[in-house]
Every structure is written in structure tokens, then in C-alpha cells.
Image (spheres, rainbow, N blue to C red):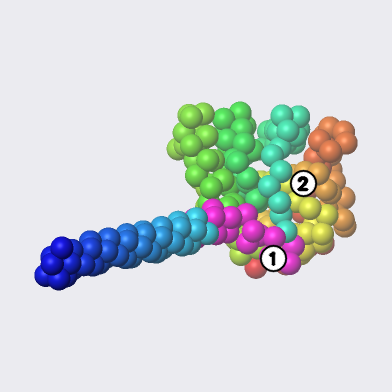
Amino acid sequence: MSVKETKEEVCEICSLIGGESNSVGNKIQQSRKNERSIGLALVGLTGGAAIALSVIAAPFVAPALRKVCLPYVPATTEQVNNVLMALKGRSGHLVDLGSGDGRIVVAAAKRAKLKSVGVELNPWLIWYSRWLAWRSGVSSQTSFVTRDLWKFNLKQYENIVIFGVEEMMPHLESKFVQELTPDACVVACRFPLPSWQPVAAFGNGIDTVWLYKRPESSKNNIK
């Protein structure tokens, strides 16, 4: 074999090695690009999921950050029936403070024939309540508002329903004294008002509801 042929073979081998090296390098580079793309996609998905969870959870977490938390605990069928018994013979407008899934508002409109409003902070429960009212055929007799109950004025309502917690009842008494009309009534569920004397009580245990009339001594304090 001549020196020329030997050189040609060596060049050919080097060319093959160089081509394979370039091919391997290209594959490594492409692999890194793919990994980077997957990483960015995972970051995007994780960030999107975190934002979505924050949006969904916010209405549930926000009330817990308040001084007095009013948790969502659905009323039992017995409690609903007791509320309606307390409202028997009443007329005018009703407001349910912390209306939850809207079952009290819907029942009051359907069975007690009261124009009823639900006040609730959680927008998901507001949307469900509106659907329930529509499904029950009382959407024109009911309305639901996303509002802080402490900032909602009660002056135009003759009937107030509250499923409260023990810590908030004294504060509610003060609010009622300032805002209720002389002929208004309050139906308290689960926990009674600490200072007012009920005119009647319906049910037993956790299903008990108390009916109150505004005390005479506070009727000149309406604002």
C-alpha cells in the first residue's frame, strides 16, 4: 500500500469519526433542549395549578382570617323546618346572614312566601344558591349577594335568620340594636343571643332555633 493510499484511508477514518462526534453532539444538544422545554412546561403547569388553587381556596380561607369566623355548616332538614315554624305568620322581607348553600332562603321563599335575601361571602356558594333557587322555582322571590354580613344594613328587613357561632353572638346583638326596626324578629340557630330573652324556642339539641323580638329598651336606637 502506497503512502498516498494510507493517507486517504486515515482521512476517511477521521471523517467518519468527526461525523459520528458531530452526530453525538447534536443528539446531546437536542436532548438538553428537550429537557429544558419539559422543565419550563412543568414550571408553567405548577405555577398555573398554584394560581388555580389559590383562586379556588381564597373564598374558603378568607373568612377564617377574620376576627370572627362563620364557617359553612349546612342546615339540617330539622333546622330548616324549625326556622319555618318560627317564621309562621310573618310577612315582609327576610335576610339570612351567612346563607351558605341557600337552603333557608329558598325554603322561606317557597314555603313561607317571604321575599328572601341571602348574604354570603363565598362566591361558589352564592352561585350554587342561585342555581338551587332557579331549580326550586323561586328565583324571582330570592336574591343572593356576596357581602360581609357586618357591613350589610338590616334596616329594611323584618325577619333576620342567623346560623352563627358563639363568639359572634354578642357582636350581632349590638348590630341588631343599631339597625333593626321595632317590629323585626330574629331567628337564631345553633347558638342563642346571650342577652336577649327569646319569645319562643323550637326543636331540641343542635337543631334548636330561638325566636327573638327587639327589646323595648333598644327601640329608640335605630340608625
Which residue appears at 46% of the width and 33% of the height? 134
Question: Which tag is nearer the camera, tag 2 or tag 1?
Answer: 1
* Image coordinates for residue 203, horizontal then vertical, percent: 84, 32
Q: Position of residue 109 (x, y in %)?
A: 57, 35
Above or below 126: residue 1: below
Image height of 149 relative to 112, above or below: below
Image quarter of residue 179 = bottom right
Of helix, strand and loop, which mostly describes the magenta segment? Answer: helix
Q: Residue furthest front?
A: 1
Quarter occupied by residue 24: bottom left
Amino acid residing under circle 2: Ala
Residue under label 1: 66
**Residue in the image at 57% along x and 30% along y:** 110
The residue that disc 2 covers is 188
- Residue occupying the point 61% across, 64% down: 151
How many marks the image carries: the answer is: 2
The residues colored magenta run 51-68
Q: Could you say whether the residue bearing mark 2 is in a helix, strand or loop?
A: strand
Residue 61, picture quadrant? bottom right
Tell me residue 166's x, y (percent).
Answer: 83, 54
